[in-house]
Image: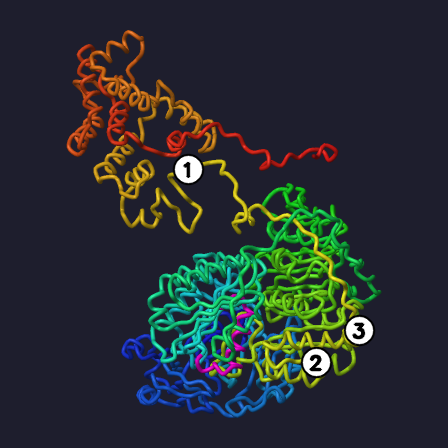
Amino acid sequence: MSAKAISEQTGKDFLYKHICTTAAIQNRFCYANVTAETDWKRLVQDHPWLLTERLVVKPDQLIKRRGKLGLVGVNLDLEGVKEWLQTRLMKETTVGKAKGILKNFLIEPFVAHKQEEEFYVCIYATREGDYMLFHHEGGVDVGDVDSKALKLLVGVDEKISADTVKSQLLTHAPADKKEMLISFLVGLFNMYEDLYFTYLEINPLVVTKDGVYVLDMAAKIDATADYLCKAKWGDVEFPPPFGREAYPEEAYIADLDAKSGASLKLTLLNPRGRIWTMVAGGGASVVYSDTICDLGGVNELANYGEYSGAPSEQQTYDYAKTILSLMTREKHPNGKVLIIGGSIANFTNVAATFKGIVRAIKDYQDPLKEHEVTIFVRRGGPNYQEGLRVMGEVGKTTGIPIHVFGTETHMTAIVGMALGHRPIATQPRVAAHTANFLLNTSGGTTVSESENSSAQKTRAGLPPAKSTTLFSNHTKAIVWGMQTRAVQGMLDFDYVCSRQEPSVAAMVYPFTGDHKQKFYWGHKEILLPVYKNMADAMKKHPEVDVLISFASLRSAYDSTIETMQYPQIRTMAIIAEGIPEALTRKIIKMAEEKGVTIIGPATVGGIKPGCFKIGNTGGMLDNILASKLYRPGSVAYVSRSGGMSNELNNIISRTTDGVYEGVAIGGDRYPGSVFMDHILRYQDTPGVKMIVVLGEIGGNEEYKICKGIKEGRITKPVVCWCIGTCATLFSSEVQFGHAGACANQASETALAKNKALEEAGAFVPKSFDELGDVIKSVYDNLVAKGVILPAKEVPPPTVPMDYSWARELGLIRKPASFMTSICDERGQELIYAGMPITEVFKSEIGLGGTLGLLWFQTPTLLPRYACQFIEMCLMVTADHGPAVSGAHNTIVCARAGKDLISSLTSGLLTIGDRFGGALDAAAKQFSKAFDSGMLPMEFVNKMKKDGKLIMGIGHRVKSINNPDMRVQILKDFVKQHFPAAQLLDYALEVEKITTSKKPNLILNVDGFIGVAFVDLLRNCGGHYLDQKRLKQGLYRHPWDDISYVLPEHMTM
């Protein structure tokens, strides 16, 4: 989420450090924190004013209206504070519906003042800017400030001024305090903006002749701005809402989330509950919680959480084992249920994530059976068939009851099964793999509709008008970011829709030079240009009017602002989640001024069947075909959630003639375009006959739909459901997966919005479970009236499946080009000869043991002496001094200004028979002689007769009388530790013969290491010898793995 509440102490700390004002702020940093572990003697030493001042004490745990609840001790001395705390510290209390322990208190100096010196001030963010509220009467009895207070709206990108503060906020303020208040309020607002606050309330703000006192303060900051504000914020702790404990498991998942590009969330509601969830998707997680509560499970719901954004197998394993660990700590008399649910994924590989969950289930199979856990699974998306298969298989092998369902089952049907409200359905046979993708043998279907997506002409003096039609079957887009999978998905969609040309004209990626990127258009390979600079892409592709931005949350703002400098762009999709709200509002303002439609941020995008799709929207081709997204239907939808938009594709395709257009506006608090922007487009589009809206808790946009229906601006049937109905049933505030899914007042709850929509005339189901039934009822009625004439179904065109995906699904096999037997880097961790790298380190085998492991290729490690010997050899040969050929060449190269790699390779290239190569040659010569049964004397004589040098014999400096200590050390070690050293003994006999002729013809360090290694590793490995051992022949790369870029007329 973005807006997160901070403690009063943290808020005041920010204010005292960073506010810039001429007003004299009193009692700066005068606060002391008290918990059950507080050492009072140390506290007094750190805060001596505790002994001299009258004091105020209050809990600092996000509790509202503490004064009204009797939770503020006023005008006490230190002993009085201690006495006051005795009856409250670590005691349970009830605030509203929430029960919690009072465990964190704040002590501050008491400020004696008059009632007329108390004021109220509040700043909060909205889509159009930041409102500052001021009331000249503050304090506990301030009452309904929304109706009483004076308001000042500071628009996005506008600055606050002293004059506007004075004229609009301080009309009732005492004249003698106006100047001080003006300076403080201007400074407060600037600090609020600078530190990315989203809410800041001070009540009361006390102003006396001595200065300004900030007595009580509540605040929220935009946590997504951490990368911008880290230097000023420091390490911020976000306390949980009162009534909910902060569990270490929540912190562990939050840490996983921070280190991952995926989204991982966990909130514990009732650790003793029997209903646990593990749901994929921010929107889907809310829908499942709603359904559980609708069916009476609110008191047994143990957790809220979600995993989404394509987490890896390991991340999903870590998430799943945390859930399983929590749910198997305490038994429940009725056993427990685990609901592993989700909508139809757009791009997450379901099988990969399920493998992580399966690993966790296997690890916890005994506790799961002991706690009588039953698991219900429902999922769809890329490779979901394989995911469901492995999930069903683990149920059979472990004996844990696991009920598995796919896209043929309504998303939340498993909740009713799990809670005993409906019978457990017979599990249908799951398809072995994803849908067939074949070469297109026909021309395919032609999309009947052809619309122009060009923007309307700008009216003089007004912002450019936004187009009713965002996409057509001629729309061309630029994709920002190297998202090759998403682009290929768009091209496959284009092809299956029988578009004449790809919808992607080019890509922009600032981190490489201009180049071409390979993609498939059906069975044919094509090249798309990739530009380093956006200006080049726009100049060379004037036909483009859509930009799809996959920029990261840190770069999305800058790249979006740059894009809007080009008038040709009329629509932008911003995929990134976590853009600070203040920056998003600036994007929205500029887009309004330039007449650009923004979809996102925090979205998967949108889709117009038969015409165009944004990025990963709609999932892979099997879902495109199953949901009939290759041709237009009659139903248009708009949703916040990307995952739930794909679920809507499924529901609408099963209950109507299909989707005409669908947009996921994004889960942030301020989406670039709102529900009404798209509903009004649909209203004005003849092909759309009915509209579906999936709203959610938080914000007021759904009320604009109510107004549009009542005023007659919307005349087409609207089916609408707002998710998040469970929120009002929880005792403490729960932040759901989407940043905007949080109700700040009663009107923002899902229940209130659903009621208002129904009263306005929208078709509102009783629950999400019934959404499909209501859509079908409205559609059937329109068909009966003749408003909709269902088009005759035609077989969809087909497209080839990518090799990588076909291999993932196990549909094809292909002989490998290479074989290796010593190392495997494909899985979660590197494996050496069957041993995971973590085990290599745990075994403490050292460098020698690691090399030995690779060479011997056996899980049984080398003996310790062998590992030590390898390491000793590396130590004694680490350097031969500056005079030898290799070192000499390296030095000369370095002095010539060459880089490290060039200098090193210059030295390495000198290795040969005369330098460095003696080690290998010595091993070969001595081994061959020994293995053939030659006596040492016969070997020496033969080499002399053949006119060959004996490699490894001889030294320029060392001799029998001045031995090489390196050889001596190694020889002593081998003689002491090796069980046998036959080749070394043979070489030493040869040395006796050669040194009798000349004292410097000793067995040198190269020769010694060569023969000793043969004794140690007669059958050693490494990649070179691995290939020799496997008897691999000449390699020639296959033609079908090479793109031959030829002139167009020569292409085969």
Where residue 417 sits: x, y (%)? Answer: 50, 75
Q: What amino acid is labelled 3 in the image?
A: Val
Residue at coordinates 45% horizontally, 82% vertically from top-left?
299
Q: Quadrant of residue 823?
A: top left
Mark sitting earlier along the chain (3/2): 2
Magenta stretch in the rendered image: 279-300
In space, the residues marked 3 and 2 are separated at their CA atoms by: 18 Å
Helix, strand or loop for the magenta stretch, by majority: helix
Where residue 739 sits: x, y (%)? Answer: 56, 70
Residue at coordinates 38% horizontally, 83% vertically from top-left?
102
Residue at coordinates 70% horizontally, 69% vertically from top-left?
656
Q: Is residue 164 above or below residue 230?
A: below
- Quickly name the residue at label 1: 820
Asked if residue 299 is among those painted magenta in the image, a careful observer would answer yes
Q: For marks 3 and 2, give the one nearer the viewer.
A: 3
* Observer-nearest of 733 and 439: 439
SS for callout 2: loop
Where residue 179 sits: x, y (%)? Answer: 59, 80
Q: Say which mark, if any, is on residue 787.
A: 3
* Observer-nearest of 507 and 115: 507
Q: Is residue 1014 left or right of residue 160?
A: left
In space, the residues marked 1 and 2 are separated at their CA atoms by: 64 Å
Q: Is residue 540 above or below residue 999?
A: below
